[in-house]
Amino acid sequence: MSLRLISLFIFLLLSSLYLTFLNTIDVSFRILPKEWPLHILQERFSMFTQSEPFNVPLVVIILISFFFGVMIFSLINTIQKSMNLFSDWKTALKTKKKEKINRMFLKGQTCLLGGRKRDAIHIFKKILRKDPNHIKTLCVLGDIFREDGKYSDAVRLHLKAKSFDNRNLYILYSLEKDYDVSNAFEESVALLKEIRAIDRESLTPLTRLRDIYISNEKWEEAYSAQKELISLTNDDSVLSEERDRLSIMGYEIGMSRLNVGDYVSAVKEFKNSISLDTNFVPAYICLGDTYFKQSKERLAIRILKRGYKKKESIIFLKRIEEIYVRRRKQTKIIKMYQDAISQNPNGYLLRLMLGEACLRLNMLDKAMKELKKVEEINPDIPSLHLLLGRVYEKMDEIGVASKEYQIASEGESSSLLEFYCKGCGARCEDWMGRCPDCSEWNTIDIRAT
């Protein structure tokens, strides 16, 4: 018992005696019930259970009540202080543990930055043994596992981190990367939609959604994501680029319609693609192909000519030539190339194609004239000498024809034209809207071999 309480007790005792001496008023006092049911206790405590109560000075009762109140208050205060001390002790332990873990985490990051990945992994695993719920360590170690190709371990750690903070964007994006590299398409899409709901102003989740849809050839979903992305874009330079991407997706949707024979929907999508990007060659060509499949020859040629007027790509004329060949309209091919040459006199490829067309119609003098002009512009084209050899052969000038064939054979190909990608340089057997090698759109062009 503290000195303060002893002093208080002595003070109350003396006060009680002093006040009892001055105040003689008594109070009838009974502690237990009048009729005590247990006879043994009743006999032992007869002074409390007697029928008549005993008298106690009023001052004594007041002082005793006050004393017990002070004691109860002191007891409660002591208990509260003990609890606070225990709580402070626990907090100090947690703080000390947290500081130690933070030092270990910093050491692990230092090892990681220094290229000592194995040491970093060892430290991070040690942290998780001490604190399995350390979010930063779960994230960093998960990233390391993903880089090492341990995708399931990366997902496990990032999912655990997400269970403690499901609105932390760093955790969510890390988990999405895990799903992406492990080709978990549905999980990746679901997580990006979750991120989108959390961060409505960010373009990143929409961009990632679009790219994932594109990589999985989900063109309609990609188109929807791209439209929403455009609605949030304010930069005009970026907006133009995003509209071009939307044109590509519309084209791919049109191709899917065309492949199943839904020509009406295909025409609609190709037209929409052209309206978004008037320089997108594949949409013009496939729209022309769709019209031709619908036996709308004039519409097909009209749209292909419009595309050539816009881009001046030989591919359009080659496509029109194929239509004329199928319809046995060879003379129109001659006129088409002549009109194109009048607009571009130095276009040697146009003259080369005109020379070939004249050769097919046995217009040998005209063919020779055009091919000689090509020779003046670019004499090193193997296909030029191939055509010259054919012309000389038909003119019965076998010796000259042989020389031309010899020059042509020194080239890499015996064909007249070839398709190639302007982006990566890959060669293609036929025209395509998208390069099979670099996966870029609108890059396939035609050239003489």
Image (spheres, rainbow, N blue to C red):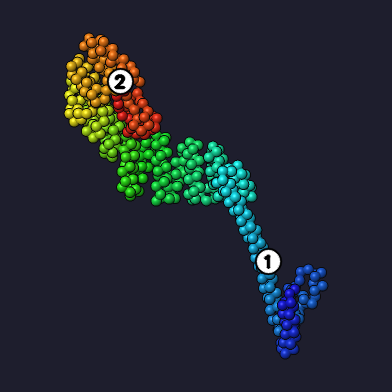
Q: Residue 373: name its quadrant.
A: top left
Residue at 39 percent across and 34 percent down: it is 217
Q: Height in image: 319 above or below 247?
A: above
- Horizontal arrangement in the rendering, residue 259 relative to residue 133 (left or right): left
Work out whether residue 391 or residue 256 is closer to the camera in this orientation and state it.
391
Residue at 49 percent across and 39 percent down: it is 179
The three-letter amino acid code for the residue at tag 2 is: Pro
Q: Which mark is residue 382?
A: 2
| Residue 15 seen by the camera | yes
Residue at 23 percent across and 24 percent down: it is 376
Are dots 1 and 2 in contact, CB under 8 Å?
no
Q: How packed is label 1: few (under 14 Cα within 10 Å), some, or many (20 or more)?
A: few
Residue, disc 1: 82
Report x, y in % for residue 355.
22, 20
- Tell me the CA gap for discs 1 and 2: 99 Å
Residue at 32 percent across and 33 percent down: it is 442
Q: Residue 306: name its quadrant.
A: top left
Report x, y in % for residue 89.
66, 62
Work out whether residue 149 or residue 132 is closer to the camera in this orientation and state it.
149
Q: Height in image: 243 above or below 61?
A: above
Kind of element beneath mark 2: helix
Q: Height in image: 445 above or below 26?
A: above
Kind of element beneath mark 1: helix
Of the 4 image quadrants, the one containing the C terminus is: top left
Work out whether residue 94 or residue 314 is closer to the camera in this orientation and state it.
314
Report x, y in % for residue 233.
34, 48
Q: Height in image: 180 above or below 384?
A: below
The three-letter amino acid code for the residue at tag 1 is: Ser
Viewer-nearest of discs 1 and 2: 2
| Residue 125 seen by the camera | no
In primary-sequence order, the first of circles 1 and 2 is: 1
